[in-house]
Amino acid sequence: MTDHNIFHLFRNYVLAALAEIVPDLPEDLAARVEVTPTKDEAHGDMATNAALVVSKVARRKPQEIGAALAEKLAALDFVERAEIAGPGFVNLHLSPDLLRAQLPVMLRRAENYGDATIGQNINVNVEYVSANPTGPMHIGHCRGAVVGDALANLLAKAGFAVTKEYLINDAGGQVTALAWAAYWRYLEAIGTSLTEEEYSEEVPGGLQYRGEYLIPVGQRLAAEHGGRYATETKGVAAPEIWFEIVRETALEMMMVGIREDLDLLGVTFDRFSSERELVLKGATDATIDKLTEMGLIYQGMLEPPKGKLPDDWEPREQMLFRATAFGDDVDRPLRKSDGSNTYFANDIAYHADKMARGAEIMIDVWGADHGGYVSRMQAAVKALAGNSKAHLDIVLCQIVKVLKGGELVRMSKRAGTFITLRDLLEEVGRDAVRFTMLTRKSDAQMDFDIDQAIAQTRENPVFYVQYAHARCRSVLRAAVEQGIDISGEALADVPTSSLENAAEMTLIRRLASWPRLVEQAALAREPHRIAFFLYELAGDFHMLWNRGREDATLRFLQADQPEATLARVALVAATAMVIRSGLAVLGVTPVEEMR
RNA sequence: GCGCCCUUAGCUCAGUUGGAUAGAGCAACAGCCUUCUAAGCUGUGGGUCGGUGGUUCGAAUCCACCAGGGCGCGCCA
C-alpha cells in the first residue's frame, strides 16, 4: 500500500533532489531533513529545512542550495511553486489537485487512514492505573487511566503491538492494613460489642481504611462464614485463623469495584498482573540473584538525606542495588529491615517479567508523586536489559484539581469530601471526563472544571468536537435522503475539482495532516495532541459551515449542482471519518446527533 | 539542603522535539445576524515566552546560574 502520509512522500522527493545537489550526503544529516506543514498558509503548504541542514557540510550558502533545490522541486508534478524563503527554507505550494486527491485516499482507507508504520510491530507494554486495591478509584487515578488508555490506543494506531497492563499491588503492607480494616467490618457485621477505637488498638499500626466501602466486605464474610472467624465473644480472633480469607475476600471485592469503575470509564486491559503471585513464584528472589551475579548488589550504608534528618533516622546496613552505575543519584534499597522486599525490588522483578514476556518498549504511566522513582526504575531496566534494545519510558501525570461553580473542590479522605471516579462519571459522563483529561499535557497540572466539561459551548472542547461530528452526520443524513450514496467507495470516485473555496482547502489540508500528527504524537508519547488536533479540525469545519450561513452557495447540498454537492459530501464524509478515528484513539463516542 | 517537573496575551492553555512575523479559546473592543445548517457570526487590539548569560545560520525549545510554584527525598506502594 502506498504511503498515505504526504509529508513522507515529499520528504522523499526532497531527499532525491538534494542528492543531486549535494552528493554523498551523510546519513545522519539526511535524517535531519524535515518536511513540515507551514504555520502560515502564505508560506505554502509545506516547507523543508533541507538547505539549512546541509549547508555546512556542502560548504555552500543555504540560499544557494535552497535555490537549486527549489528549482528541482518546482519541476515536480503537483508542485505549483517552490520558493526559497527566510534563512533558506524552501516553501512548497502544492497544486490543489494533489490535496483534493487525498480525499479518495481517506475515504477508501476509512478508519485506517492515519495508521502509521513507525511502530514496526514492536512489542510495547503500557502499564497504567495500577491503583492499590485498597479502595475505590478517585480522580487522581482517573487521569492516569485515561492518559494510559489513550496512549496505548495511539501507539497501536502508529503500528506498535501493544499490551495494556495493570499491576495489582496486592503484596505489601497496605494490603495487610486492608485485611485488618475489612475484618473490622466483619466484626461489626456479626454484632461485636467492640468500639472502633478499641479495635484500632488491637491492629498493628492502627486501623487505617475506615471508609464505608468495606462494609459490604464485612457483610459478605459474615453471611458466608457466620461467626467462625471471631472469638466466642465476637472479639478479635488470632489472625492465623481469619487473615488469609479476609484478605482474599477484600482484595477480590476491591478489584471487582475497580474493574467496574474502569469499565464505566471505558478503560480496558489485556492483562492484570498480581504482584503477590510474582513474589510467591520467586520472581523477586530470582531477579535479585541475577543482579547479584552481575555484581550490582551489595550490603551497604546509605548517606542520610542532606538537610534536616527524618525523625526516625538511624544508620543501618542494607541490601542495595547499584543504581548509580546506571545514572541514578544514589544506590537503592531492596530489603526492608524485617527482611521482606521493598516495593522497588518487586517492581524490578515485575519489569523483568514484562521483558521476559517479550516487551521491547515498556511505558509506565505514573502519578507525579512517584516522580522520585523514575531514575531508579530506569536504572534497573537498563541493568537488566543489557545489550537488548529493551527500555523504559515513564509518563508522569500531574495532579488534577477539581473546580465546581468556580470553587476549588477540596479533597480529603478525612473530611469525606473525596470525589470518587464514579461520582465524577455520574456527574460529567464518560466522554467528557476522557476528553477533558486529555486537554492538557500530562506533565502539566490541570484544573478540571466540572461546569465547563458539561457546558454546550465552544469553550468546551468535548462538545465542540462532538458537535462538529454531529453536524457532519446531519449533512450526510440529508444527502442520503436526496439519494446520494455516501459509502466511502462511492464517494472516493467523485470528482472533487469543484472544491476550491479557501475554507474548504483549509479543511482538506488539515485532514491531510492527520497521518503525520498520529506519528508525531506517538513518538512523543503525547495523546493530548490528538485532542488538540480534533479541536482545530472541528474549528475548520464549523468555520466552513458558518460560511454557508452567510453565503448560501457555500452550503454543502446544492439542489441545482449535483456534482459540486457530491464533492462536498465527500469532504464532509472524510471529515466525519477523521473525527471518528481521532475520538476512537481517545476512547470518546462520536455522537450522531445532538438535540 | 538535594533531585525531578512547571513558569508563554488580563484568564485557561497549545506551540509539530532547534525554524520564518510565537498561536487558539475566554474576556475586552467594533460591526453583523433574529436565521432554518439551533446552542450566533465576522473582525480588531493585546507578548521582554519568569530573569540574566551562553551554544549557532536560527532559541519559547538546548546548556549554566538566579527567582517563583509543584512533587519527592532509607524499611509507603
Image (spheres, coloured by chain):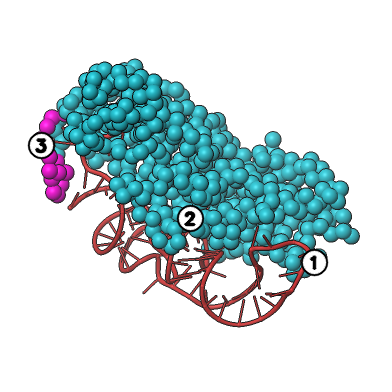
The amino acid on which the numbered mark 3 sits, given as a three-letter code, is Glu
Question: Measured along the vertical axis of the image, is residue A11 above or below residue A388?
Answer: below
Q: Chain of mark 3?
A: A
Task: Please say if the residues under marks 1 and 2 sit with CB atoms less than 8 Å apart.
Answer: no
Question: Measured along the vertical axis of the image, is residue A317 above or below residue A136?
Answer: above
The residue depicted at 63 percent of the width and 59 percent of the height is A539
Give the foreground label among 3 and 2. 2
The amino acid on which the numbered mark 2 sits, given as a three-letter code, is Ile
In the figure, is residue A92 to the left or right of B59? right
The chain whose colour is red is B
Magenta extent: A304-320
Distance, label 3 to label 1, CA atoms, is 80 Å
The residue depicted at 54 percent of the width and 30 percent of the height is A161
Residue A511 pos. (x, y %): 66, 51
Q: Earlier in the sequence, mark 1 or mark 2?
A: 2
Tags 1 and 2 both on a single chain: yes
The image's mark for residue A314 is 3
